[in-house]
Image (spheres, rainbow, N blue to C red):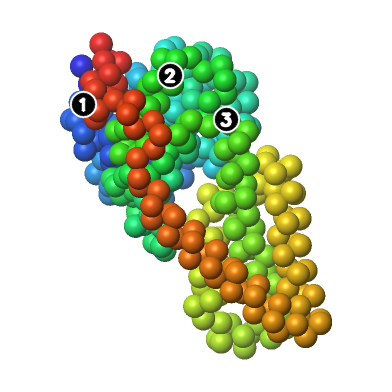
Amino acid sequence: MSIKVAVVGLGQTAISAAMALSNHSKEFTISGWDPDLDTRVTAERSNVFNPVCKKLNEAVRNAHIILFSLPADESVAVLKELNLFMQQGTVLLNMSIPFQQTNQWMMENLKLCKYFISLFPTINSKWIAASDFGTGTARADLFSGSHIFIADTGKTETVILDLAVDFVVLLGGQPEFISVEELDGLIAVNVLLPQLASAALMRAISTQPSWREGSHIAGSSLFHGSMPLIDMEEISGQSILTNRDSMLHHLEEFARQILEIRRYLMNHNSEGLNDYFRNAFESRERWLTARKGTEKPSKMTNNLPSVNEALNRILNLGK
């Protein structure tokens, strides 16, 4: 019996996961849905969905697993609608950030859903410099060898934790257990802060009176510096607002760094400024070197199921 996987939210992450699953077995029947028409049209070109549905109820009907991956500003409305169609016993794998808030929304709105857990896949280092992030850029090997965080609330049943590990193995990743609170904190500083900094940079430059002429001078530095804006899942700021406490803390540190540069300038401190930039450059080089090494085995490697074991256990959900 085939396993039906419904993908709700057709971004790069979710479609890449669907591609990885479909590569393992034809027993997976994967449907897809997104609230945005253009996204659905683009997702159809991936040739992984059977089908991409126009309505949410069509996509999730009789699903064994629902992969939920929507921006925070769309999650609540979709979860309320999902509650009307989701059958009891379906497992929901959540990839929508921030996880604490989304978990709360799921508990409030999914009355029949007993089984859900959150996953945060990291991208394989060979794709880290890619400048394309959208629906049409999904790849089956996007998570190959990378760490995929499993956010445990401390109350998650063992059977769901095991299923999450099996799912991670099929995506080609390495599972890392982490608390929901810690994961949200890591996302705030390592994902959301660069996006906020990028927005502030773009605003600081584009609101200058000289921007009409300056826009012709601006080149690769501004292009790459503003790149995180393209990677933002939503522009309402909902994911940032729901992670408010962490974001305020990290914004204070970011502001402190800007003020440190300002002090060097005011004091004509060329040595301090030189050291500051050199340290920043060296930190970047160390990060990229370490990032390329993240595809090493995790501490769980010896206890991981094989791909065949993971596949058989997930396929047994349909029996």
- Circles 1 and 3, Cβ within 8 Å, touching? The answer is no
* In the depicted structure, whether residue 279 falls above or below residue 94: below
Residue 158 or residue 94, whichever sits in front = 158
Q: Which residue is mark 2?
A: 160
Q: Is residue 29 left or right of residue 211?
A: left
Residue 297 or residue 136, whichever sits in front = 297
Q: What residue is drawn where x is 18% and y is 30%?
A: 26
* In the depicted structure, whether residue 112 falls above or below residue 99: above
Q: Where's residue 17, x and y in %?
A: 34, 39
Say whether disc 2 or disc 1 marks the residue closer to the N-terminus.
Answer: 2
Cα separation, mark 1 vs mark 3, equals: 28 Å
Q: In the image, what residue type sits under mark 2? A: Ile
Give the secondary structure at mark 3.
Answer: strand
Q: What residue is drawn where x is 73% and y is 57%?
A: 253
Q: Where's residue 72, x and y in %?
A: 58, 40
Q: Which residue is mark 1?
A: 308
Q: Is residue 129 left or right of residue 200?
A: left
Q: What residue is drawn where x is 57% and y is 20%?
A: 154
Q: In the image, what residue type sits under mark 1? A: Asn
Q: Which residue is mark 3?
A: 179
